[in-house]
Each structure stands twice: as C-alpha cells, then as structure tokens.
Amino acid sequence: MLEKRALGNTGLQVTFIGFGALEIGRDWGLGDAEQRRRPAEEEAGKTLNAVLDMGINLIDTARAYHESEARIGKYISHRRAEYVLCSKCGEHSDDPRTYYDFSYQAVRDSIDLSLRLLRTDVIDVMQIHFGPESQKVLDEGETLRAMREAQEAGKIRFLGASPGMDVLERCIESGDFQVLQIGYSLLDQSAHDLITRAHEKGIGVLIRSGLAAGWLTSRALTVPPEQRPPKVQKLLELCNGDAELLHALALHFLHRHPGISAVLVGTRRAENLRRNVDLLQHPMDEGLLQEAIAIGRG
C-alpha cells in the first residue's frame, strides 16, 4: 500500500509519490536529443495506465506541457475517479514553444481548453504557472479572477500556484491558495522554512524539481564529471559513485519534511516511478543523510 498524505486542508489524500506528466507530452530533461524526446502517444498511454495500476493517485500536468493534457484525456479519463488531477494556466502551449498570457480572457479560455483536452468536468487543482513578472501577475489579479470564476462554476475545486521564491511567501500569506507547488531538493533547500509555514496554514505542498531535473538520479552519470554541478559531484563522491544511493538520499530528504504532501516525479516510463516508490521503502543511514544535507546546503 502506497503512503498517502493529506493535501493540506482540501480533504484530499494523495500518494507521497505523484506523477509529473511533463515528459510524456513535451521534450525535456537531461541527456541527448533522443533521451529528451517525448514518447510516442501509445507509449505515453501505457505509462499513464501503469501509473494508476501502481496505485499512484496524483497526476500533475499543464497547458504548457504540449501534448500531456490530451494524452491524459485520451488514455485515462475513463479512470478519472482513481486520481487527483492538477493542471496549470498562464503559460500556454505553442508546440514546440510556450508563451505567457495571464490576462482574464486567456486564462478563462485556457481552463476551458484544459477541461476539454483532459475529458473531465472538473479539475481538482488549477495552478498559476508563473513565469516572468510574477509580482505583476498577482498585483493585476486577472488570473486569480478567472480562476475564482471557474471555481464558482464548478470547473475547478481548489486554487493553486507554482511560484518561484520571488513570490512564494506572498502566495502563502495571501490566503488565496489551497495548494502550492514548490521547488525544493537536496540541492536547493532554500524553501524549507516556507514549506513549514505553508503547512502550518493548511496549504497542501507539492514538490517540483525534487530530483533536480535528474541531477540526483542515475541521469547525472550521463554527464562527464567536469560538467556536473559541484554539489552533484560531491554528493556522488559521498555515495562512492552509486547514483542509486544518491537517488535514495534525495527522496529520503524530501520524505522527512512533514510539510510536504507529495513529491512530483516526472518520467517517460512507469518503471522509473516504481523505482522511486521502492527506494523509499528501504531505511536510510541517518549519518549519511546528514552529510548529504550538509553538502546540499553548502
């Protein structure tokens, strides 16, 4: 049975490992062009169904993830009762590019398009997909107005945001959001105290970039040592070059924070998601974890 945690005060329970559906719809990640390429549509469909078969009940997507929403709608909308669905608005798809438009009408249209592509009547969490000028987006308030109207119309259940550190505290203190998606990892621990603050206010916290876009997994080994970030190289040396151990350390670091509801893991293949679940089952040497945390802070 997969561990579940409360998503803040929403009343939803989500698996600690959630599926980040970026890579099934958009070219992304470390490695060469082939390693970054999104899977074929049917392969993405198999991955999505395997995610649900595994018992994972949290799926996070976005309009900016190109084909992701449409693939979710095509391949698992018939299993809609099995997952908590999160999407994002404000950054829009113009495959292979994206663009930002946080105006009232653009966000309203984006939410309606997401509903059609996802083949659902309601999206559980709709998040502002912040980019440049985040403060301005909040000051103008058009995005939030469109989201609130969609919520009142029953199209979305909870309001969320995926902010950077520039507006994270403002989002926490505003009272506008029931869920926040926050960048946090062994390599970047700067949000630690703000995650605690969000938790204290009953906000559900989803972690993005928890594995640092692959730097805290075996993908780091595909990059020559001299091209790796210094902290990554130090962590690999601590693990005697064992990238699986580094991966486990990264997950256990996230798991120990009580303010985190779930960690979003992005991958093209379901077996990689299973590996994350398995790595959390094994106990971790506390001394080694503390050394890794110290390196990450450095």
Image: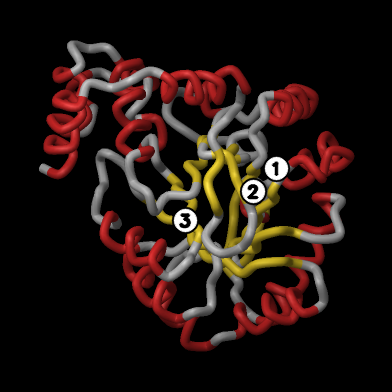
Quick check: can you spot residue 297? yes
| Mark 2 residue crowding within 10 angstroms, few (<14) / some (14–19) / many (20+) | many
Mark 2 residue type: Thr
227 displayed left or right of 36 = left
* Whole-number angstrom distance, CA of label 3 to CA of label 1: 22 Å
Residue at 71 percent of width and 66 percent of height: 157
Closer to the chain start, of discs 3 and 1, is: 1
Where does the image place residue 116, in percent across and percent down from the top left? 86, 56
Closer to the chain start, of discs 2 and 1, is: 2
Residue located beneath label 1 in the image: 68
Q: Which of 263 and 136 is in front in this view?
A: 263
Q: In which quarter of the image is residue 151?
A: bottom right
Residue located beneath label 3 in the image: 205
Closer to the chain start, of discs 2 and 3, is: 2
Mark 3 residue type: Val
Judged from the image, the secondary structure of the residue bearing numbered disc 2 is loop
Q: Residue 61 — which label?
A: 2
* Number of the front mark, 2 or 3: 3
Contact, mark 2 vs mark 1 (Cβ under 8 Å): yes
Contact, mark 2 vs mark 3 (Cβ under 8 Å): no
Where does the image place residue 13, in percent across and percent down from the top left? 61, 49
Residue at 47 percent of width and 87 percent of height: 139
Judged from the image, the secondary structure of the residue bearing numbered disc 3 is strand
Judged from the image, the secondary structure of the residue bearing numbered disc 1 is helix
Mark 1 residue type: Ser
